[in-house]
Amino acid sequence: MLLAYHRMTASLAAHQCRFDELPQTAQDRIQQQVERALQMEQLVLSSPLAADVVIPDSLLQKSMASIKGRYEAETDFIADLTLNGLTQSGLEQALARELKADATLERVAWQVPHATEAEVRAWYDAHPERFSIGKTRDARHILITINEDIEENRREASLERINGVLKELDGTQERFAEAALRYSECPSALNGGTLGRVAKDTLYAELDQTLFAMDADTTSGILESEAGFHILYCEAIYPAQKASYEEAAPKIKAAIDKKRQTQAQKAFVASLLKDNNVERKVG
């Protein structure tokens, strides 16, 4: 059952299909990966660190429910298990082992000291280029979509509608927000069409080029993207700047901690391999 479970998950992750649907070369590659994964899982579970790790039944049942939730009916779930050479009890057993192995590796990570403020500050000072923020804009937009299956959203009809909206605008932020709430077909309409602080190259290219050429408190003409027709309003312009240490510190600390935790987990696995005289394979 353990082998069947790992075959199933590895095949889905790599090829989005069942193991038995793969060509022989792919099956051989998956089989090698599965054998290594099972070997590593067993080494982790046999380690002293895993001895008192207990997986709550509620967590196991939550994982089972998450898998079952991918199927429309219980019968579909059972049928797919059967096709993958699994039973419900076999799946539960495999999940319990996987959860315990993951929890053991998490223990390794928890034992790693967190980055100190001095280390975070040193990293910030050594990498100033990482914290440069380009020019940004506060912007709003109005969207009328194009959908040839809906009469009022066919291209000509949508263009006529967006032209009508443009005529109602008077250049003020207040009127633009009112029009966005009334006409826009973007979820941002509920907030007066606001897009918030926009960095360059985050919008559709057609919109991005126009927005970053606009002055503050100005309205664009009609623009077209693959989503439909737009009107932009540029509220404010912000020059390029450097993120402050206070802004960057949480992300730096998290990145340093994550890197150290990953290194510690790799070292833990390497020690298990060495202690058990297992050759480490790459790939």
Image (tube, grey):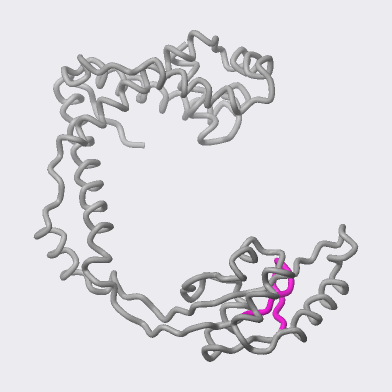
- Horizontal side of 39 relative to 230 (left or right) equals left
Residue shown at the point (77%, 86%) measured from the top left: 167
Asked whether 6 or 71 is in front, the reply is 71
The answer to if 212 sits in the magenta stretch is no
Quadrant of the snapshot with the C terminus: top left
Residue that appears at 39% across and 78% down: 134
Is residue 231 highlighted in magenta? yes
The secondary structure that dominates the magenta segment is strand
Q: On the picture, is 242 further left or further right than 219?
A: left
Residue at (41, 28) in percent of width and height? 33
The residue at the far bottom in this view is 215
Left or right: 233 as drawn, with respect to 56:
right
Eyeballing the image, is 261 above or below 254? above
In the picture, measured across the screen, residue 5 lies left or right of residue 142, that is left
Q: Where residue 279 sits in the image (x, y, percent)?
A: 23, 26
Looking at the image, the residue that sits furthest to the right is: 151
**Start-end of magenta stretch:** 222-232
Q: In which quarter of the image is residue 173?
A: bottom right
Please name whichever residue, 43 or 33, is drawn nearer the observer in this view of the structure: 43
Residue 265, image x and y in percent? 22, 35
Find residue 117 and report its horizontal and vertical position in percent. Answer: 12, 58
Instruction: Residue at 23% x, 66% y: name it.
Output: 246
* Figure check: 68 above or below 130: above
- Residue 27 against residue 176 in the figure, above or below: above
Where residue 269 appears, as percent x and y from the top left, is: 22, 29
The number of discs equals: 0
Q: Quick one: 175 or 95, which is closer to the camera?
A: 175
